Every structure is written in structure tokens, then in C-alpha cells.
């Protein structure tokens, strides 16, 4: 099997910034509550005409530029998201076309906030076996269009954005280990109930606001704290790394208290944790690849550094990966 690594990263955040203050006129909340309970100060919101494939195409093109690769050289595009443009067709087909990746196969992957980790695990297999050479993995979300701006339990938490990584064969380093998991018994904890085959769209589902994200925050919180520690430890064991050898933790960005607890369990100081939650909120599949792109572009990651990325989300799903830069 060939070794696989990340050749380049890219990201795109919509222009519009929405502050916590703006929610105070919509629901019974405050900037102070949101900051102290979550760590979020503001988030980006896509324009009415922007959908997941648009954000994906920009982030993807930036990753290709960073990798020095022409779009025609991409073999496969995977878009991980839970807020696709439409059910049909796959957003990955549209994103690939918009980027000019005319030779590429393309498909969507949905494991909610864990989609980027799953996408890298899937994409890396194609390269390891020699079937493909260049796989573009994108995590992109336009959650703002699935939020109920009358529900303070959810609307303040999420943001829009996209991040991408171009995967290719490497001589040294690269992906050392993955850990993926799923537990459908918790499938009801974060869900958009209507619009699928379980509850097709109707006037009644619209009336009942069933096309928006519903979440049991308390239960997800407990699950997240447990799974982020377990999934991190399993991937460290598989990679043969000790906790003190981690140079950078890039966790899913849902709540600063969850990230704090993960850092503590791993014995890491917060300087070794990549954060964008305060500026971006929870961008689901986009949180990790955007944070990765930010630390790479800021020069905070050097060759040989050991990166641990870990995510969790609806499904329930979780995943972690160990990458030597
Ligand atoms: N403003 C003011 N009050 C609020 C708000 C708000 N925006 N949201 C909730 N509250 C209230 C609740 O209604 C509750 O009031 P009550 O006691 O009168 O019922 C009170 O605050 C406390 O609620 P808790 O749920 O106990 O608050 P908690 O400290 O747990 O924070 C939060 C809630 C932020 C949602 C937290 O539970 C959390 O972060 N959970 C994890 C979410 C997550 O990780 N999601 C990731 C997956 S997302 C995906 O896959 C797409």
C-alpha cells in the first residue's frame, strides 16, 4: 500500500459576519450566555444564492492552488456535508464541475460533523491501493439555511463555511491511523426530521417547522466529551504516538468546554489546540478542515509535526486521524 498525505489545504468563509448580539432580537438569549456556555462570538452566514457546492468549489480550488495541481488532474472529489444543495444531484458533482475538475469522479458523503474525517479515510484508501493519485476531500456546510431562528437551543450554535484538503501519495509521513465509529441508537439526538423518506415534505411539516435542525444539546454534550477522549486515544495507540508527542490538536468546534476537556484528557495546553469556534461557530463538516487550513497558512505547522484531528456529530458518528505533516 502507498503512503498517503495532504499536499495542500484551502478554505472559504462567506463574507457576512453575524454577531451574538443579532440573536438578542430574535430569541431570548444574550451575547454573555452564548460566549460563556459555548465560546462562540460570531459566525459566517452564506448569501441567499450560496449553497454547499459554491463554497466547496472555492475551498477546493484554493487547496489545489496550494498543492500546485491543475483541476484536470484531480481523480476524485468527495464532498462531506449534511446541508447539501439538493438531494439530487450530489453536490460533489456540481462542485467538481465548478472547479473545472472535468476528469474527476465525484460523490457526497454524510456523517454530519465527522464528514471530513470520514472523507479523508475514504479518499486515502483509493490512493493507498493505487486506484487514484489525487483525491480532493472537502467539508462544507450552509447550516444557516437549516436553522430555526425561533429556537435558541440551536440557532446560536452554527455557522457556514468550507475547508478542503488535496490528498496524494507521499514518500514520508502522511496519514498514520484512522478511527471511525457510528452508533445509530443516538440517531434522534441531532436531526432534521422532515424532507426525507421518513417524513416527506408537506404543508404540515412546514407548519411544524420540521425541516430545521433539532438537537438534544445535553445528551450530545455528554456523548461528545466521552467519545472525543476515546477516539483520540484509540488513534494514538494505532499510530504508536504518546500524548506528549502531539504537536497540534485540531478538534471539531462545537463547544469550548468540550474542547477544553479533550485537551485536558490529552494533557495538552491550549496553545497546541487549533480554534476557530469563537469566529465561526460550529461549521459541522467544515470546522476541522477550515481550522487545519488556518494553522497551515499561519505557519504553525512544520514538516514532521504530529497532528491529531478528532470529530463527532449526528448519527451519532465520531472519527479521528493521526497525520504526520
Ligand atoms: N440563550 C439562553 N439560554 C439558552 C440558550 C440560549 N441560546 N440555549 C439554551 N438555553 C437555556 C436552556 O433552555 C436551559 O434553560 P432551562 O434550564 O430553563 O431549560 C438552560 O439554558 C441550560 O441549558 P443546557 O442545555 O443545560 O445548557 P448547556 O450548558 O448544556 O449548553 C449547549 C447547551 C451549548 C447546546 C451544550 O449542551 C452543547 O454544546 N451541547 C453539544 C452540542 C454539540 O456538540 N453539537 C455537535 C454536533 S452538531 C452536528 O452534528 C451537526
Image: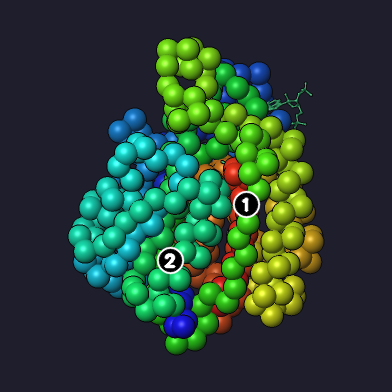
Q: Which residue is mark 1?
A: 182
- The number of callouts visible is 2
Of the image marks 2 and 1, the number of the one nearer the N terminus? 2
Pointers 2 and 1 in contact (C-beta within 8 Å): no
How many residues crowd mark 2 within 10 Å: few (<14), some (14–19), many (20+)?
A: many
Name the residue nearer the viewer: 191 or 266.
191
Image x and y of residue 222, in percent: 76, 44
Q: Tell me how far mark 2 sits from mark 1, CA to CA.
A: 19 Å
Image x and y of residue 45, in percent: 44, 36
Q: Residue at x 45, y 70 (%)?
A: 124
Image x and y of residue 284, in percent: 53, 46
How many residues crowd mark 1 within 10 Å: few (<14), some (14–19), many (20+)?
A: some
Q: Residue at x 49, y 24 (%)?
A: 199
Residue 294 got which mark?
none
Residue 123 got which mark?
2
Q: Secondary structure at mark 1?
A: strand
Residue 59 position by quadrant: bottom left
Q: Residue at x 52, y 82 (%)?
A: 173
Residue 80 left/right relative to 252: left
Amino acid at each position: 500500500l502507498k503512503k498517503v498525505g495532504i499536499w495542500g489545504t484551502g478554505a472559504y468563509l462567506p463574507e457576512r459576519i453575524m454577531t451574538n448580539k443579532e440573536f438578542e432580537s430574535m430569541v431570548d438569549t444574550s451575547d454573555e450566555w452564548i460566549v460563556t456556555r459555548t465560546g462562540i462570538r460570531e459566525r459566517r452566514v452564506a448569501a441567499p444564492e450560496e449553497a454547499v457546492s459554491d463554497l466547496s468549489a472555492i475551498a477546493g480550488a484554493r487547496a489545489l492552488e496550494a498543492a500546485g495541481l491543475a483541476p484536470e488532474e484531480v481523480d476524485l472529489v468527495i464532498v462531506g456535508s449534511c446541508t447539501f444543495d439538493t438531494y439530487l444531484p450530489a453536490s460533489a458533482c456540481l462542485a467538481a464541475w465548478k472547479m473545472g475538475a472535468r476528469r474527476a469522479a465525484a460523490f457526497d458523503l454524510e456523517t454530519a460533523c465527522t464528514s471530513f474525517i470520514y472523507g479523508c479515510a475514504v479518499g486515502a484508501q483509493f490512493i493507498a491501493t493505487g486506484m487514484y493519485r489525487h483525491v480532493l476531500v472537502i467539508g462544507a456546510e450552509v447550516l444557516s439555511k437549516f436553522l430555526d431562528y425561533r429556537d435558541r437551543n440551536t440557532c446560536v450554535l452554527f455557522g457556514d463555511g468550507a475547508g478542503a484538503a488535496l490528498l496524494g501519495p507521499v514518500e514520508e509521513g502522511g496519514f498514520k491511523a484512522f478511527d471511525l465509529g457510528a452508533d445509530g441508537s443516538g440517531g434522534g439526538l441531532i436531526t432534521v426530521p422532515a424532507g426525507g423518506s421518513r417524513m416527506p415534505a408537506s404543508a404540515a411539516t412546514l407548519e411544524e417547522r420540521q425541516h430545521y435542525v433539532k438537537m438534544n444539546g445535553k445528551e450530545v454534550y455528554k456523548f461528545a466529551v466521552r467519545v472525543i477522549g476515546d477516539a483520540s486515544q484509540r488513534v494514538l495507540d494505532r499510530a504508536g504516538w504518546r500524548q506528549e508527542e502531539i504537536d497540534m490538536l485540531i478538534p471539531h468546534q462545537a463547544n469550548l468546554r468540550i474542547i477544553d476537556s479533550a485537551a485536558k484528557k490529552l494533557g495538552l495546553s491550549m496553545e497546541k489546540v487549533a480554534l476557530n469556534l469563537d469566529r465561526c461557530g460550529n461549521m459541522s463538516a467544515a470546522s476541522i478542515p477550515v481550522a487545519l487550513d488556518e494553522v497551515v497558512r499561519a505557519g504553525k505547522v512544520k514538516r514532521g509535526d504530529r497532528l491529531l484531528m478528532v470529530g463527532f456529530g449526528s448519527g451519532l458518528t465520531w472519527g479521528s486521524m493521526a497525520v504526520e505533516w
